Image (spheres, rainbow, N blue to C red):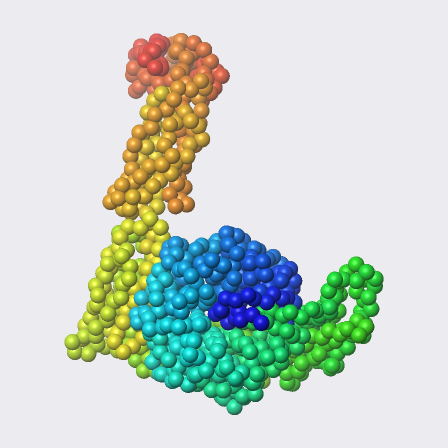
Amino acid sequence: MSTLLCVGFLLALKVQTPSAGVLYSGGYGYPINRPHQAYRDEMGPTEGVGKVVQADGGFTHTVALRADGTVVTWGSNEERQLGQGDLPSPVPGTMVVVPGLPKCVAVAAGPTFCLALSAAGEVYGWGSNAGWQLGPAVGTRNSKYATKIVGLSNIQSISAGNATGYALRSDGTVWAWGNNSYGTLGDGTKVSRQQPALVVGLSNIIQIDGAGLRAFALKSDGTVYGWGENGFGRLGAGSTLPQVTSPVQLPALSLIKRISGANDHALALRDDGLVYSWGQNDAKQLGDPGAPATYQGRSLPAIVPGLSDISEIAAGPGSNLVVDVDQNLWAFGRTNGVLGSFSIAYPTRVPNVEKVVSIASGEYHHLAVSQTATPVWCQTVPGQVVGGHENSALRIVVEGGTAVDLPISLASSTSAAQLASSAVIPAGQSEVTVPVTCPSLVGTYQTAVLTAAVGATRGAASLGLSPERLDLRLPLGEVDAGDSAALTIALNFAAPAGGVKVGLWTDRPDALPIPASAHIPEGQKHVTLSVKTTPSASYRVSEIKAQAGPLSATAVLGIRGNLLSSVEFVPAILVGTRTATLRVVVARPAPEGGTRVDLLNPNHQITAPDYCFVPAGKKTVSVLVRTRAVTTEVTLPLTAVVSGFRPKVANLTLRPPTLTEFTVLPQRVEGGGVLNVRIALDAVSAGDIVGFTCTDPAVQMPSSGTVEAGFRTLKFTVTTLPVSESVYASIKARLRGVVVSTWVLVTVPPPPLASVSLTPSVVKGGTTVWGTVTLASRAAKGGVLVDLKSALPNVASVPPTVFVANGSTSARFAITTAAVDQPVKLSITASLKGVVKKAALTVNP
């Protein structure tokens, strides 16, 4: 049996020869995790992926390792977590092979990024890089393709946290990199870094496990160590500290052979097959029906009742999968629909999946690799409905298809889910879909078992029938005082005509002001509000209640006391070299002597003091922060810390200068002439290189030019070549995606000016005279401009130039005369390239 293990947002594994099989998957509400099906509320084979060794699930994407060592992905691609360039998101019905990877032996999925371990012991990453979890080679940007994480070698297992990467070397040491806001790197600090570094105080480690904002390590002697965020005692060390920045031993655990953590709880497997759980229990994920379903849960590990002879474990957000020694699959907690129930407090066998060799849990889906053949399998689409509001369908698949019309007998375990008694898969097909109607409201949750029999072979699928329900959801069950929380008010059915009004109450309006009501629009199932907590230095708990007719729901939000109310840059985005203001706000007026706020700045691009003081009696202080020029946009964190309280991070985005001006003068030049080029930026350069393109070689434009560091402009001259006919050249300047264009007309030498004539040459003042300029030959492409001048412009005015069009030898121009008291004689002059011609004009009274 393989020892590969996927764990929700994370992966921990010991690299051995794995067992390949069929990838089963199941989940609800996020169909993008199903490449070829809408979505699935029970486990079933995943089409098109082939033989799979191991798979892992992120927030809304999946990554799988095939038996041949290739890696495939599917699902969302907003952060380029599919590793296949700029594919749209989601990518419906499409699996992609991640390019640029050598043969791999393991994969791991973070919420929106992936890691892969090569057979040579090197680590690759792609997707989101919000916490620098893709290593120093990527910089601060997301990576749309797999990139090697430098500084790692001889790696035998990998793991991914929320925005942190972990690697276990063959010498038993652990290495970490990425976000460190909660001490998740285990180096005794909270300073994030891109370069992998040793986790202090660990040796003889045989398994690692990134678990959201914390991590666990299993030693060869069966002891377990943990570090990172510790809200609600998620580390399992019995400590009340909000975070632990160095590994500490979990005292209640010994003789452990496997660990598995998620972002809210964790599991440990003892060598006798018993399982421990600890952390939150809001989704009943601790597997103990007697434990209260609260965020507080428990901070020390305890045995999960009713579980024994377990060989494998996988904790996901609010959910768990375990495998027994007979390779059967079990689930408890938030089962994501695979058991037709939202949350189950006791371990329950998952039907239709046997001979399981690897398991994983994503945010909204479960994964299992099985070595069982599946000649007939069934799927309900959707797998859970609200009775009286929604219907479903039963999809029946026969592996390999059928050469003749194949009759199928159908049955349902309850009249609440009704379908035909038989169906036929046509010859040459492999499946059929049968409608399932659910006509009645149900008072309690029910599970309908729908069966399909082909001769003696039988397949089954469960359909969850839910009563009408109102839910309150808080993705973050605990926030810092002064921060906002996302409160989602959700129905499990679409709101009828006119929508649904939901009344809202809280027992602590002083801590969490909320509106008196919310409105779920017609046809929608939910609405999300942003509710902001009030500043406070003490811990508070606010209970929120919602009521819509007979439906009600409650939720609890923990509000961590924090003397720091907010830390922000003003402005939060600016061009490098300019000055920003860091504004620090505390929850109560500073005492005599002021309140010291330490400022942790790991960035060389910004300069800030090491600390500042909020003046006595005041609640705010502003600090000037100087910045340096940058050549790429970068977001830089600065952490503010008041001793004894949780830190807060302010992010400052620096962008490089952009093009604001691009001129080329003159815009009309005779071939062989010189052009003057000027580039201007909106801020001081850091040595920015501007690229140039030109549509015609007659303009000898360079391919690039450098704006020297400390300057904002670039000036240079460009020569042109003689041309046989006039040409328009389009010239573009490009700097980091900003393109500014202009044009130049390069002309041939004009033909000589032959004459200028006037018709008539004697006129009465106040009338118009027409003049004509004539060339010695036809004007070339681009035409010819002839300069004009009147000897007495107050008597006879002319335009400054006249244009002889392409292919013409002459052009007319108007002369406007003024009234005069006596005859006036004057000359009209035309000139071109030094050739001057004149015509006489007489203006009479």
Residue 786 x %, y %: 38, 17
Q: Residue at x 50, y 71 (%)?
A: 7
Q: Nearer the viewer, residue 238 or 737?
A: 238
**Residue 352: in sight, yes or no?**
yes
**Residue 518: in sight, yes or no?**
no
Q: Residue at x 37, y 24 (%)?
A: 720
Left or right placement of residue 226 versus residue 430 in this view: left
Residue 38 x %, y %: 64, 65
Q: Quadrant of the C terminus?
A: top left
Q: Residue at x 28, y 50 (%)?
A: 629
Left or right placement of residue 553 versus residue 643 in this view: right
Res 549 → quadrant: bottom right
Q: Nearer the viewer, residue 3 or 193?
A: 3
Left or right placement of residue 657 versus residue 346 in this view: left
Q: Residue at x 32, y 63 (%)?
A: 637
Q: Is residue 828 above or below residue 680?
A: above
Q: Is residue 628 above or below residue 644?
A: above
Q: Quadrant of the N terminus?
A: bottom right
Residue 728 x %, y %: 44, 27
Q: Nearer the viewer, residue 105 or 595?
A: 105
Which residue occupies the extreme left position in the image? 593
Q: Nearer the viewer, residue 316 or 6?
A: 6
Residue 809 x %, y %: 46, 13
